Image (tube, rainbow, N blue to C red):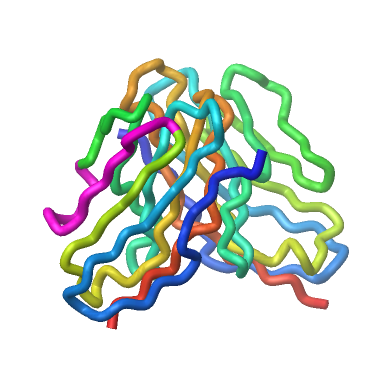
């Protein structure tokens, strides 16, 4: 298996633009998580899905953030409009069993200028 | 609510020596899982080792081992024969074993930066 695949690896965008981050989980994993990592706040859970259904989105910072999982093999995290404070590394992770932890993607480094 | 504490923001060790990273957690549950993740400069989060709370035997993965003290709620990571490639941020994490959607979240420590001196 290729692992959790995220794209793009780097994204630089101007303030006010829409940004879409993509994630392909490991086949067969039924949980998908979106995290944000910054130096100031560390790892923050934004939202997670079970069987494509959002379970908890309480970590989504505001309405500018939205996430979808239209099928078991694809998820997106969208920021519209983007702001400089959204600059961070965004990770996607998937999980099958509770005792096996998560498998992370390589992350997307987002820079909003 | 569960919490995870890593009290060492940074540790350094001489190459080939042994280092121990500390992690404590707070929970009222009796069944749970504990993990150590490594994040090297490449930023990829990599699972290093995991421990089931119901197992008394400490988990071991090659040069990595844990000292799991359930009563003390302590879960330290020992790295033997440290190598330059071990330099990374190390995160301790907790996950409940209770089967509910909310328990699929990992509770994270703040991380410990490990520096390997050549």
Check residue A69 for magenta coloring. yes
Residue B105, image x, y percentages: 39, 35
Classify residue A6 as left or right of residue B28: right
Residue lying farthest left? A63
Q: Is residue B13 above or below residue A36?
A: below
Q: Is residue B43 above or below residue B95?
A: below
- In the rendered image, the quadrant that contains the N terminus of chain A is top right
Front-lying residue, A58 or B77: A58
Residue B42, image x, y percentages: 61, 67
Classify residue B107 as left or right of residue B111: left
Q: Is residue A13 above or below residue A64?
A: below
Residue B54, image x, y percentages: 59, 17
Q: Over which residues does the magenta segment extend?
A: A58-72
Q: Tell me what residue is drawn at x 18 percent, y 63 percent.
A: A80
Classify residue A78 as left or right of residue B82: left
Residue B43, image x, y percentages: 56, 63
- In the rendered image, the quadrant that contains the C terminus of chain A is bottom left
Classify residue A87 as left or right of residue B15: left
């Amino acid at each position: 298996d290729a692992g959790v695949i995220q794209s793009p690896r780097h994204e630089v965008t101007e303030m006010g633009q829409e940004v879409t981050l993509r994630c392909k989980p490991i086949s067969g994993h039924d949980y998908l998580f979106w995290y944000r990592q910054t130096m100031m706040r560390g790892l923050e859970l934004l939202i997670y899905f079970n069987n494509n259904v959002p379970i908890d989105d309480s970590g989504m910072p505001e309405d500018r953030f939205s996430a979808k999982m239209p099928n078991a093999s694809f998820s997106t995290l969208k920021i519209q409009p983007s702001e400089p404070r959204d600059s961070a590394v965004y990770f996607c992770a998937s999980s099958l069993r509770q005792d096996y932890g998560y498998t992370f993607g390589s992350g997307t480094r987002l820079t909003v200028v | 609510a569960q919490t995870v504490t890593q009290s060492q923001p940074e540790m350094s060790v001489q190459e080939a020596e042994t280092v121990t990273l500390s992690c404590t957690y707070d929970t009222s549950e009796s069944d749970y899982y504990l993990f150590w993740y490594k994040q090297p400069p490449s930023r990829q989060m990599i699972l290093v080792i995991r421990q089931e709370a119901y197992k008394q035997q400490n988990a071991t993965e090659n040069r990595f081992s844990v000292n799991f003290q359930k009563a003390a709620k302590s879960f330290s990571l020992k790295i033997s024969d440290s190598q330059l490639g071990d330099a990374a941020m190390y995160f301790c994490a907790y996950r409940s074993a209770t089967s509910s959607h909310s328990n699929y979240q990992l509770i994270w420590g703040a991380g410990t930066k490990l520096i390997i001196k050549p």
